[in-house]
Image (cartoon, rainbow, N blue to C red):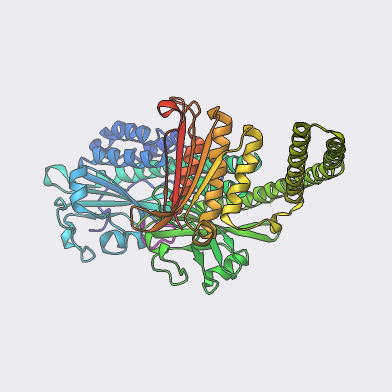
Amino acid sequence: MPVPPASAPTPPPEATPSPEGPPDSAEAAARATRSLQGLSTELTARVPQLLEAMRSVGTGLELHTTLDRICETAAELTDAHYAAIGVVSEDGDGLSDFVYAGIDEETAARIGHLPDGHRGLLGALIHQPETLRLADLATDPRSCGFPAHHPPMRSFLGVPIRVQGEIFGNLYLTEKRGGGEFNDYDVHMVRVLATEAGIAIGNARLYEAAKQRERWIDGSVAVTTALLSGSDAEDALAVVAEQARHLADSAAGIVLLPDEEGGMEIVAVSSEEPIGALGVAVPPESRIIADLLDGQAVFIDDAATDPRIMTDLARHYGPAMMLPLQSDGRVLGTLVTPRARGARPFTEAERTLAAQFASQAALALMMAEAQRDRERLAVYEDRDRIARDLHDLVIQRLFATGMMLESAQRRSVVPEVQRGVGKAVDELDVTIQEIRTAIFALQQGPAEAPAGLRTRVLREINMAAVPLGFKPSHHFVGPVDTVVGELTGKNLIAALREALSNAFRHAQAARIDVVVDSTLTLPDGERGVRLTVADDGVGIAEGGRRSGLKNLKRRAESLGGDSWYGPGIGEDGGGTTVVWQAPY
């Protein structure tokens, strides 16, 4: 049914943006009032209701709340049972959102999927955005019917909503109360309301865009602060992954770094559900890898079906952004933010903001790397100085003292004195050997350090002995060096360092036992390794901080393992026992 018929009163012109910008609510109301002058008494009598509806629609700035309010107001204004707004997607080929009023949650759940606008009458209105009034939906050849459990709908009125001259979507009204049709006056009212709705939506969009930019900027600041606060590289990458997941409203945040084979390896994961992705490699044969290493962002509509992604992890996800962490022409890695299958795609604004976040994160990573290099250089210089002092001063003095004692031993005629001095000389020899071993360790570079897990565990224990004031005991079970892989071993060492650090800072312990057991069978039947660090300290205070323990658990879960804590080895279970385990 064409709208309006020739005999009907001339509808008011739809408001369009002026050269100075979009009209405000007062201007729209004035235009609406002028355009309705000279119309019928019935239409004029409904003007106060229309003005009240316009005032209601223009209240608030949150976009989805604004759309809900428009639907409810339009239904009330036209006495319709149901109202909806279909938001046209950015590519103009369907609906990116569908907001409705009049259908309760139980009915909506039985209906199932919301309309996508790819077919039927709603799809036709997307490609031909014009006012449409029908006495019976079923009589229109473009109608494709309703899904099961959908309430019956006959009368229909559809009006396009424009925001700053561009089509935003369509306002749909169905099933006028009393079984009648939508009349010409309803058309006039809804057209004016659609104009005000366009203004309100435009304002809400601007507000939401500003809030979104603010969130991404705050996220970038948080990443920069965390990276420059002295965290190690792994923790820094975990911060980037976690912030990106929250900001992009994605199912996971994943950071990949280039590997030796020319592909990329997942080195940090933030996800609500453990996905065991840490250490997964994307082979260099993937066409995406070349683009990423070339500094190009890759946007994917459905990761589960995209043939370019050659990992099993992709089957869990739908839309995804893959952004190079690039600074000063150097690609440090890749940031991936995938959403769940069936989730809404990323908008252009989200893609732009995420790319800017990735660039900022890459710059912060480079600055943090340079800062760590400076700190590492300072440590090496200090270690060289300590090694020289130990060699030139301490060992020489101990050697001279030993010679003096040997001379005194030869001169003494008392057997007990000779034996005591001889024992002291032997102790000095042992001490000199231990100092020489320490000097050798201080002079080693990171590449020269032994790679065995047992050796690395011992090194962490020896390093912890200095601030603790005593050396923790240790025990190894099983072939630790031969069965535990490099990825799990690296994370076990980080977990040990965290546990010993927590014990030093909080436990006030006099005894710490470290056990590494590589004969473990995990609950799922997989072989694994377990690290246990137990102390006899004061235990964990009620309501105390748990950040270190959360880090241990996150690190274990990223490998498919777990971490927990319990009573310690002190009297009556005093102290704390921290357990960390993962498959190897």
Tell me the quadrant of the picture where the N terminus can be found.
bottom left
Q: Report if residue 140 lies within the magenta region.
A: no
For the stretch drawn in magenta, what is the main secondary structure? loop
Along the line of sight, the residue nearer the viewer: 90 or 359: 359
Q: Report if residue 90 lies within the magenta region.
A: yes
Along the line of sight, the residue nearer the viewer: 164 or 370: 370
Along the line of sight, the residue nearer the viewer: 541 or 305: 541
- Residue at 65%, 57% (x, y): give it: 450
Q: Measured from the top left, where is residue 412 in percent x and y?
A: 84, 33
Q: Measured from the top left, where is residue 64 in percent x and y?
A: 37, 42
Left or right of residue 220, residue 58 in this image: left
> Is residue 432 visible from the viewing direction of this image?
yes
Question: Is 415 above or below relative to 71?
Answer: above
Span shown in magenta? 89-95
Instruction: Residue at the far left: name it.
Output: 178
Left or right of residue 377, residue 205 in this image: left
Q: Measured from the top left, where is residue 343 in percent x and y?
A: 37, 55
Left or right of residue 114, residue 254 in this image: right
Q: Measured from the top left, where is residue 141 in percent x and y?
A: 21, 66
